[in-house]
Amino acid sequence: MLFPTITFAIFFMIVLPTSWLLMPRRERWKIFMLGASYFFYGYWNPRFVLLLAASTVVNQFFGRAIFRNTSERVRRSLLGGAVAVNIALLGYFKYADFFLRSSRDILDSMGLSVGNTIIAVTLPVGISFFTFQALSYVIDIYRGDFQPGPLLNFATYLSFFPHVVAGPIVRAREFMPQIEERKDPRRIDASRAFFLIFIGLFKKVVIANFLATEIVDVVFASPNRHSSLEVLIAIYAYAVQIYADFSGYTDMAIGIALLLGFRFPQNFDGPYTATSLQDFWRRWHMTLSRWLRDYLYIPLGGNRQGKWKTYRNLMITFVLGGLWHGAAWTFVVWGAIHGGFLAVEHWRRTRRAELGLADPPDTFWRRWGARLVTFHVVCLAWIFFRAESFTNAGDILARLFDPAHWSDASPLVKVSVLLAIAAGICEQFVSRGALARLMAAFSRLSPVAQGVTLGFALMLINTMGPRGVAPFIYFRF
Amino acid sequence: MATTRTPPSPPSPGRPVRPTRAARRRRVELEVEPGETPRRPLAAGHVIVVALVCLLVGSLLNAAGIRKTALGQDVGTKRDVAKFFADPLYDISHFLHTDRIRQGLKNALGRGSDDDVNLSLPSPTTTTLPAGGTSTPGSTPTTTVPVKKRAFSPARPMAVWVGGDSLSITPGESFINIAPSTGVINVIGPVDGHVATGLARPEVFNWPAHMAEVAAASNPDVYLITMGSNDDQTLTGDGGGEPFGTQSWQDEYRRRVGGMMDQMTGDGKHVLFWVGIPIIRNVARSEEHYRLMNDIYRTEAEKRPGKVVYIDIYDMFRGPDGGYADYLGIGGVQVRTPDGLHFTRAGGDMIANKVIKAMQDTFDLTSWQKSLPTTTTVAPATSSTPSATGASTSTTRPKSKRSKKSG
């Protein structure tokens, strides 16, 4: 079930009042919300509800066992078992064909033909998200940061429909205490919730879908047929498309959770305003970068074991982060570009410190220069993220830098495309204060006036967007 | 809003304390981040009122789009229920003129026909099999090719429109990438693909009406269309109503296919290449539905020799065991996507090469090379694609002098 559909609107109009009516009777509320979330998840493919339920039971078992045991050796073994089970689950559904294909290619290149060994597994939607959330639950219990809750609470957390398919990656210690806390049904931050939902809808339905159909899909499918300018604008358009698509989804998820009385962590904070790669990862998919930092980068040693191990840890973290997005070598390259440039930034900072040089002054031009460099490094990585193969990525880059095609006609570079790109980037520079003032003014309208205003917004979004709803990019991950 | 600045006086004994206006507001407003303007919360009941009013107003303003979405549902109870609500909603919106805002915006965006529901479909003007016409299943192409082939050259390239349902998109993109290597094929625009469409449901997307617009706008020499994989369902629109597979369904579907073929090629100036439906992972659906439909495309094409060429790809995607295969060839190249229906780039390339071969058989695409002072076909480019029999084959592409545009 996709958020921007009539089916979801009907589903939510049943869930919202029922949830608030049942809220005082907490156990009934949990059972209802678990059922609603399983229905939401199973609407796509009912069989995978069993997978989600199995993941819940297994991780709860490990979590409880780790909590009960006092022997560090046993606890460590149990943690290893939990990590192995989760990685095996993810590995089978997401990476089995990738590893089989890669192994077979290597054997083929050595003259050892092993025939077709592909098993063609269907990828369950959201598996990367709920597996990471389950892992954080077990690891936090192991570290003593969190105590396991009842199975019903954990199942409600893991399957909670606003975040189950594409995040944000909410940790158990952020969400599960909210299940038990008393919520005041008279004090819902509805203006913020509605703003998030409608801004998310606009980003997804109007900006992301428009850019995908008008230029990105066409140019990436046949780069050699387009001018260098069209290729350049298509790369910028994809940078905006993936931001609008993913941040639009998480805006909606955060808004929907807020209407149900739950707070999710922020997931995006103007990523294209970043002045360095490190800054970018503080602003892009923030819940994933926090997860990678806390459960991968720091356990690897972080930056505490010398500069070379820091570079190694950065590369490992981002290459695995790339693989988390998809089972293809292009995602590995995407991660390696990020890891590599982060290592360069780290080296530069360390070197300046070693030489005793002060930080350069933060001037307007320096800041914008840094933003432009960062944005273009991110765009370079996006080419590999979007390309269907290395050949395709190579064609994009070759066309981009081929001076013979800079003067070609560029019919796809339309004013509407440039406006959509500009809107997607400028939105990230809008001050929080301005948006807060708008939300505050909206919150002072009567409920009927708010509804009428949102009804017109719905019409605008529905009219401006292309027919149908394209799947969210991050549903594949 | 003004706030009370005077300090609160001490409460008199025996009287309840009345909080100041500022204190009341603080209690009413939500806690926000520092620097943010405070917001007022809503009670759950009011949230539901806002949502209901929003949906009501939004539905009235978007009634035309909702009606089209309702009509686009699969024929059955869900569609009936959707229509039950959408039809009166549209009538009310039309009566109140609230649909005009959306229509005005659509017109301003140049998409004024988005919400139109056009149920009429043309009937064929060609109805009989020509003398000497063949009817061997699976042969490609199956029509009688004219003795003197129409010639194209770089100076007069063959303009090709590519489109159809979702199965047209990846092979169409492959065709766009590969065709310029012939030196004489000029593809008009990107693939004109419309997901989940066909000839069964004209209220969802009316292909004959769309093709009339394409013909008027770009007048291509050749149409390359892939269509049908969504059509194994109850037909709607004029002449519809019969469930899939009955004789009446076959007769009506044949009328629609023939009608569209005649509409596109009736003037004798255009040739239509119709790519059939491949075997899919759901082999029962393939064998029981798609074979029947492919037979209709093939026999209708045979009635129109020189105008319509049917390209059969059903058997191209069989594995060594004769069944559906995701991977073909010794190297195990993935040719189908995990959904068991659509094509990967390699699968798309296989179809594009077969289409180009069919075009070379139908038209003279190479004689222009003989008039050139130097030989230009000496080094054929190869595209390694898996064959249906499991062996990897090399498809020869003539390397030709290319204009800057065709790159």
Image (spheres, coloured by chain):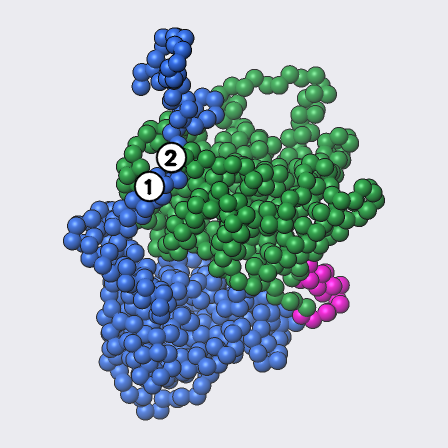
The foreground one among A95 and A445 is A445
Label 1 secondary element:
helix
Q: Find disc 1 in the rendering and name its residue.
A: B50
Crowding at mark 1 (Cα within 10 Å: few <14, some 14-19, many 20+): many
Q: Residue furthest front?
A: B14
**Quarter occupied by the C terminus of chain B:** bottom left
Q: Which mark is residue A122?
A: none
Q: Around disc 2, counting alpha carbons within 10 Å, would you say few (fewer than 14), some (14 to 19), or many (20 or more)? A: many
Figure chain in blue? B
Disc on the earlier residue, 2 or 1: 2
Q: Chain of mark 1?
A: B
Give the overall secondary structure of the magenta segment.
helix
Residue position for label 2: B42
Q: Is residue A109 magenta?
A: yes
**Residue A438 percent location from the top left of the image:** 35, 29
Q: Which residue of the protein is positioned furthest toward the bottom in this rendering?
A: B131
Give how far across and how far down residue B318 sits, in percent.
56, 77
Q: Is there any visible trace of residue A474 in the rendered image?
A: no
Please say if A310 is above or below A49: above
- What span is in magenta? A98-116
Residue type pointed to by label 2:
Leu
Instruction: Give the left or right position of residue A7, taking residue B54 as reference.
Output: right
At horizontal 41% and vertical 46% (from top left) the residue drawn is: A17
From mark 2 to mark 1, how far is it between C-alphas? Answer: 10 Å
Identify which amino acid the numbered label 1 is placed on: Val
Q: Quadrant of residue A52?
A: bottom right
Query: Helix, strand or loop at disc 2?
Result: loop
**Are circles 2 and 1 on residues that touch, CB within 8 Å?**
yes
Q: Identify the image quadrant of the N terminus of chain B.
A: top left
Name above or below for residue B39 compared with residue B395. Answer: above
Give x and y (percent) for residue B363: 39, 74
Q: Which chain is green?
A: A
